[in-house]
Amino acid sequence: MGLTNYAELAAIILFGIGFTILLIDRNLIKKNIGFAMTDSGMYLYLAAKGYISGRKAPIVVNGVTEMSAYINPIPAGLVLTGIVVSVATSAVMLALTVRLYRKYHTLNIDEIADKARKERE
Amino acid sequence: MTVALWQSIPFACILLPLFGAAVCLALPRRLARLWATFLMAAVTCMSLVFLVYMIPFGKSYNYPMGHFPAPFGNELRAGTLEAVLGLLFAGLTLICTLGGSRDAEHDISEGRQGLYHVLLLLMEAAMMAQVYTNDLFTAYVFVEIMTIAGCGLIAVRSEPGRAIVSAMRYMIMNSIGSAMFLLGIILIYDLTGHLLMENLHDSVVQLQAGGQYSQPLTMVVALLCSGLAVKSALFPFHSWVPDAYSTATPASASLLASLVSKSYIIVMLKVVFRILGTDVINAARMDDVFFVFGAAGMLIGSAVAITVPDVRRLVAWSSVAQIGYIFLGLGLHAGDAAVWHILTHAAAKSILFLSLPSLIPAGSDGSLRDLRGAGYRAPLAGVAFTTGALSLIGIPLMGGFITKLTLAQAALGAGGAHMWISLAALVLSTVLNVGYMLRCVLVFYSHPEEDAVPAAAPVRRGFALASVLVVLIAANIALLVFAQPILTAIRSGFAMFD
């Protein structure tokens, strides 16, 4: 039996790349991108797990009401909620990044931390 | 099941601040403050009434939101543990906001005062939701609301620069934690098909009994627990803590230290005791992970606190150590000790952060040598700080003593290497606690040098802070006087988890 779960595989690879960037990269914009990739990976995973091949999105058309014709709407609902949450989080992180860049003229978090420390002394 | 009126209180405690925050956005500055204070007081009163009804009720209940039945609808759940924690969180939010209000007026520019109160209300709504929710995904959504509100509370200070840097670090660390937590939720939903906690628990028990999916289940345990541990700033994920707590305005610092990090631990308690169950946690050896990192945090947090010269950073480092105590309790399977320490630390840490601004003279960066004789210049704040410090040290008159007692009892019950390591960590960390806390107290009550900084208070704090400090001193003492009934309520709350 060959592997067929390509979507899940892609999702986990995306998650891994994003998480690594979020952890390791020192550039704030790249950290933001990493965060977005991490979340996209997770939503792709959830959406892929929620899909049953051959079934339709749970919107009743043409009077078909058997349960077996449709997929479970909850994973899709969760993905939507999750997207809203990550939009808000990204917006906050980007706003902070803009404030930091205006003050310190760099995006490297180590340099920013150094400058802030000197400012204190 | 018919629902009595008092059983709707948790629902009101979540919705009132949530919609109140939206209303607050439209209000002018002064009205916003009044409105926020009024709502916080209302939630505190309701939580008190709820606790009074809950204790004789004697069992937990589920509250269906929107009257959809169990596997489809979203639910709240409350027992005595939730009632005690709800009252603690609501009351301390009100107290910290009132006590820090004058400093907040000074630290935060006029245009942002309204937004500051919106953030406070959002934070309160998120806390209450995390205490009462019975749905794992709802918990995630409110964890995120809490994260963003907490970031705002750090960054809201007028002075740009350091506050923003620490807010950024806080955001990065918390996004890492959220990502792990959310992936854990997605995996467990994938395994079980449920999000409500009872159904999740039943499925997890079945999976474990049948030996199915044991590797994904271990992964779920690791992701859920470590995600929340990262968010609650367990050592070694504490790098943002000292900066954030020492730059934020005093009300924000005390709220962040005493409540925000704790509410993630509340979600963690639900994950450990209600969703996964201690058997699964133990099978994955997660309890040992809590134990090791908790003990390390206790020692290293205290050891660093001894060396830092800045008193605000000292108190922040002590928070790192105190989070370690809570996780040590979890590692020893003593949930009651962990919850008790949540109460003690919340009461003690908020008193420390709120009394500090009166003690630090104007123009000082908060280093200890400027603080000589501060206890004479601000007598009430000095007494308040001393009370909080003594409680954290754990002298046998204060809440911290009961923590150490229950932890030591749990350690003796655990036996073996756990017993020796945790007893040694408790003793060492107590010695270190005495070292840094008494150092502060001794400095406050030593006579100032001739050329010492004159005491010109930048902010008139007046009656509000004084009454808040008196209430907090009383609360710290009450924690010892009423230790037995509170511990009984906590234990009965844990018994209701099954």
Image (cartoon, coloured by chain):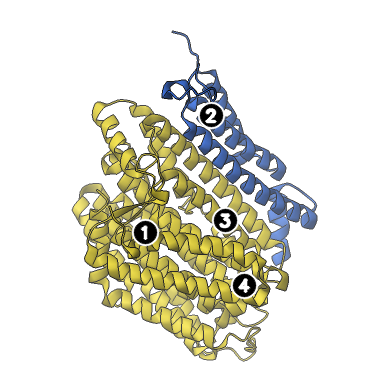
Compute the Cα span from label 4 to label 1. Answer: 38 Å
Q: Is residue B330 above or below residue B122?
A: above
- Mark nearest the camera among 4 and 1 is 4
Q: Is residue B408 left or right of residue B433?
A: left
User: Which residue is disc 2 drawn over?
Assistant: A59
Q: Are marks 2 and 1 on the same chain?
A: no
Q: For the residues labelled 2 and 1, say whether their Cβ atoms are less than 8 Å apart.
A: no
Question: Which residue is drawn at the image coordinates 52% and 27% (left, top)?
Answer: A60
- Mark nearest the camera among 2 and 4 is 2
Residue B385 is situated, as x and y percent measured from the top left of the image, at 46, 79
User: Chain B colour?
Assistant: yellow
Residue B229 is situated, as x and y percent measured from the top left of the image, at 44, 49
Mark 4 or mark 1: whose residue is earlier in sequence: 4
User: Which residue is disc 1 drawn over?
Assistant: B325
Residue B199 is situated, as x and y percent measured from the top left of the image, at 32, 39
Comparing B133 with B441, the one in front is: B133
Compute the Cα span from label 1 to label 3. Answer: 19 Å
Q: For the residues labelled 2 and 3, say whether their Cβ atoms are less than 8 Å apart.
A: no
User: Which residue is disc 4 drawn over?
Assistant: B32
Report helix, strand or loop for mark 3.
Answer: loop
Image mark 4: chain: B
Q: Amino acid at mark 4?
A: Ala
User: Which residue is disc 3 drawn over?
Assistant: B240
Mark 1 Cα within 10 Å, few/some/many (few <14, many 20+)? many
Q: Amino acid at mark 2?
A: Ile
User: Chain A colour?
Assistant: blue
Q: Are marks 4 and 1 on the same chain?
A: yes
Residue B317 in view here: no
